[in-house]
Amino acid sequence: MKILVIEDNFEFALGLRHILTEHQVDICCTLQQAENENLKSYDIFIVDLNLPDGNGLDIIQYIREFTGHPILIISGCNEESTIIEGYRKGIDDYIVKPILPNILQEKINAIGRNRGLQNTSIVFQGTYCLDVEKRTINDLPLTGTETAILRSLFLSDSNYISYECLTRNLSREFPVSSLSSRMTELKKKISEIGLCITGRKNTGYSLERVNNESS
């Protein structure tokens, strides 16, 4: 999904991008920057209240003039009147800082599912189609763990993804040896359709197309 974060603390916004690594996360640090964006192109908005050029509640009202897509407030303010005002202006959830990364991920995923915003198919380099719901890649059957690994790699778009980010997106924890074994099995399986996983635990992983051209 495509998410717009409106947050004046750039380091905190980068932290949100890291937590939501499987989504495209754009950042605006002021109301004016947000107003200059094509708001209709975003699936979800995450808004702070204390911005350098105004109140986040103002941009929420502005967003609602263009789209009914979900809006979350993440703020250090826990005053009941402010939270109520946010809901009255049309927000979908209010999260008080500090945030819990795993809870935020699940909230975003749940909102996406409930609003029908999540696409179960992801395309890589225009050739490879990963169907998350059917657990297949180009009709090749996958296990649940293999599907989760490939989903993270597809969304990284050939960029290296850290071992920590990769494992965070799995449905359950695996010992390092067990995950390494599953990665080996997955590498062998996708080699049949011309894909390979490069890298290792301490450098991160990337998905690449196999070059079959003879030298």
Image (cartoon, rainbow, N blue to C red):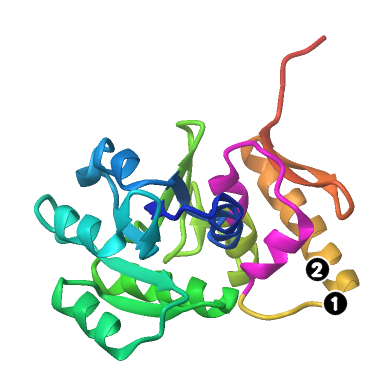
Q: Mark 2 and mark 1 in contact (Cβ < 8 Å)?
A: yes
What's the distance in space between the residues labelled 1 and 2, CA to CA?
A: 6 Å
Image quarter for residue 68? Answer: bottom left
Tell me the quarter of the image containing the C terminus: top right
Q: Residue furthest top?
A: 215
Residue 20 lies, in percent from the top left, at 53, 60
Q: Which residue is mark 1?
A: 175
The residue that mark 2 highlights is 179
Q: Is residue 14 above or below residue 159?
A: below
Q: Against 155, is 49 above or below?
A: below
**Rendered position, 208 above or below 92:** above
The quarter of the picture where the N terminus appears is bottom left
Residue shown at 13% from the left, 58% from the top: 64
Q: Is residue 14 left or right of residue 48?
A: right
Q: Secondary structure at mark 1?
A: loop
Q: Nearer the viewer, residue 138 or 32?
A: 32
Residue drawn at x 78%, y 12% is 214
Q: Nearer the viewer, residue 168 or 135?
A: 168
Q: Is residue 166 magenta?
A: yes
- Residue 179 lies within the magenta run: no
Residue at left offset 24%, top offset 42%:
35
Query: Could you say which disc has been placed on residue 30 in the image?
Result: none
Q: Amino acid at mark 2?
A: Leu
Q: Nearer the viewer, residue 14 or 166?
A: 14
Q: Specify start and end residues of the magenta stretch as a single range.
A: 152-170
Residue 55 at what x, y percent from top left? 29, 60
Measuring 25% from the left and 86% from the top, which residue is drawn there?
Answer: 81
Q: Quadrant of residue 16?
A: bottom right
Left or right side of 188 for 69 = left
Residue 79 located left or right of residue 134: left
Near mark 2 (Cα within 10 A), the count class, few <14, some 14-19 or many ≥20, is some
Please give left or right for residue 10 compared with residue 123 in the image: right
